[in-house]
Amino acid sequence: MKTMTSPVRTGHTQPNGTPTGGSRKDLRAPRGPRAKQAKRRTFGPDYKLAILAEYDRCTEPGERGALLRREGLYSSIITDWRRQHREGSLVVTPGRSEGGRGGPSRSELARLRAENERLKRKLAKAEAIIEVQGKVHALLEELSKSADIDPNSIDNSTPG
């Protein structure tokens, strides 16, 4: 079996396991009541797509398992990432990625889209009302001008 290198893990740690670069704070031992607990990893869309592509390229028996072991992943994560990719929520974004921590949830997005549609309908109604009001105003102006002409002055001007 050939040895594969990860497109993402390169440069994170030295062969002995110590981190490369970084600040002195990164080298300190964690303190506090949760010092010995593992820290949850987060994966960006670039990493997920790179691993999915590499996973799909594996053809030899045992290659996929070796990839998962090397990256410290489970097959269920690959399944989740494939679903995300199929739904369109897993795309490479230039610059700052949308979503992630602090980003809106799917239910929040659905609520905001529904509210957006409701507001669009309300705006269309308001624009129609404004248009009708403009026409009513013009009509009233015309009536007002015709009422300004005094019918008595017309009768007084003719000799009788």
Image (cartoon, helix red, strand yellow):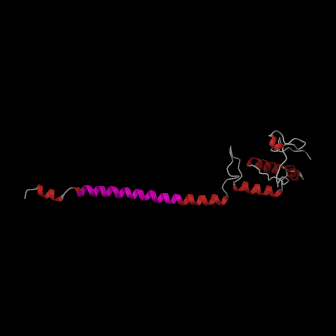
Comparing 108 with 90, the one in front is 108
* Residue plotted at (73% across, 55% down): 84
Confirm whether the magenta stretch covers residue 121: yes
Residue 29 in the magenta stretch? The answer is: no
Which part of the image, by quadrant, shows the C terminus?
A: bottom left
Depth check, front residue: 62 or 9? 9
Secondary structure mainly formed by the magenta segment: helix
Residue drawn at (33%, 55%), measured in percent from left and top? Answer: 138
Q: Position of residue 131 (x, y in %)?
A: 40, 56
Residue 10: % across, % down: 83, 42
Figure check: 80 above or below 16: below
Please provide percent x and percent y for residue 80: 77, 57
* Residue at the front extreme of this rendering: 32
Q: Position of residue 118 (x, y in %)?
A: 54, 61
State the residue at coordinates (51%, 60%).
Answer: 121
Which image quadrant is residue 113 in?
A: bottom right
Q: Which residue appears at 10% of the width and 56% of the height? A: 158
Numbered range of the magenta stretch = 119-147
Say left or right for 9 vs 155: right
From the viewer's perspective, tell me whether residue 11 is left or right of residue 142.
Answer: right
Q: Is residue 138 left or right of residue 96?
A: left
Q: Residue lying at the far top in this picture: please name it.
A: 21
